[in-house]
Amino acid sequence: MSTSDAVAFWDGVYAARPAAGNPRPNVRLTETVTGLPPGDALDLGCGDGGDALWLAGQQWQVTAADISAVAVERLAALARSHGLGDRVTTVQHNVDMSFPPGAFDLICAHYLHTPHELDRATVLRSAAHALRPGGRLLVVDHGSTAPWSWNQDPDVHYPSPREVAAGIGLAPQTWTVERADAPRRIATGPGGHTAEVTDHVLLIRRTA
């Protein structure tokens, strides 16, 4: 799938559903970040914007990036309507081509899965290098298939957090794995349907 096809695919995903008026943050983000001093954050694959808006409400300065122009335009408008326009900067960005510039205290990548070809290990390695000393990279992946997932392949493999960490290949002298586990939760999908799902959670801190 080409870059233009990937953009069209994700624009179609977001355009096919109503804009979220008050999107919720991901629970793995809130449980990880609550209590941390605010700084500069990068939200990779910001989607409807629940994470970016929550971080901005916690006094973080947020750069929210997504491949979909529909997603970032909606989030920019939503941030302004919530009085957070000065704390949320939205950028349409294809991380398979380049990485958003800057240095960050927090980078979150929630469910950075896509049907088009993506070198995730390179993207996440770039994210780790974009952290300031003491900064954290939070990677949350699907660990199971929800009934509403776009990928219903019964043979799909969900790499464990340790597999993801190994694939990134970071030097332990500079980066430390603070969390690598697979908690479960009850998720709510389109139409209010609920199901138990597994998250694969990886938290890496830059120590030097």
Image: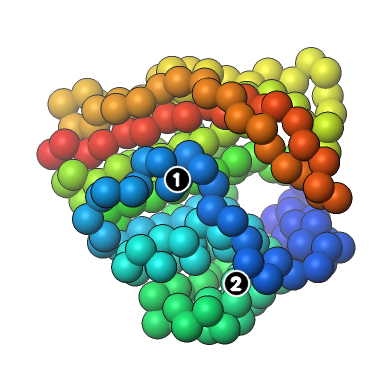
Q: Nearer the N terminus, badge 2 or badge 1?
A: 1
Q: Is residue 95 above or below residue 146?
A: below
Return the residue found at the far left.
208
Q: Is residue 92 above or below residue 45?
A: below
Q: Is residue 200 above or below residue 14?
A: above
Report the amino acid beneath label 1.
Leu
Residue 140 in the image: state x and y as whole percent: 51, 36
The residue sitting at 41% across, 68% down in the picture is 57
The residue sitting at 24% across, 28% down in the picture is 176
Residue 206 in the image: state x and y as whole percent: 22, 39
Q: Which residue is mark 2?
A: 75
Report the amino acid beneath label 2.
Leu
Q: Closer to the observer: label 2 or label 1?
A: 1
Q: Give the quadrant of the C terminus.
A: top left
Local secondary structure at mark 2: helix
* The disc label shown at residue 113, or none: none
Q: Which residue is mark 1?
A: 29
The residue sitting at 57% across, 83% down in the picture is 81
The residue sitting at 70% across, 56% down in the picture is 3
Residue 139 in the image: state x and y as whole percent: 46, 37
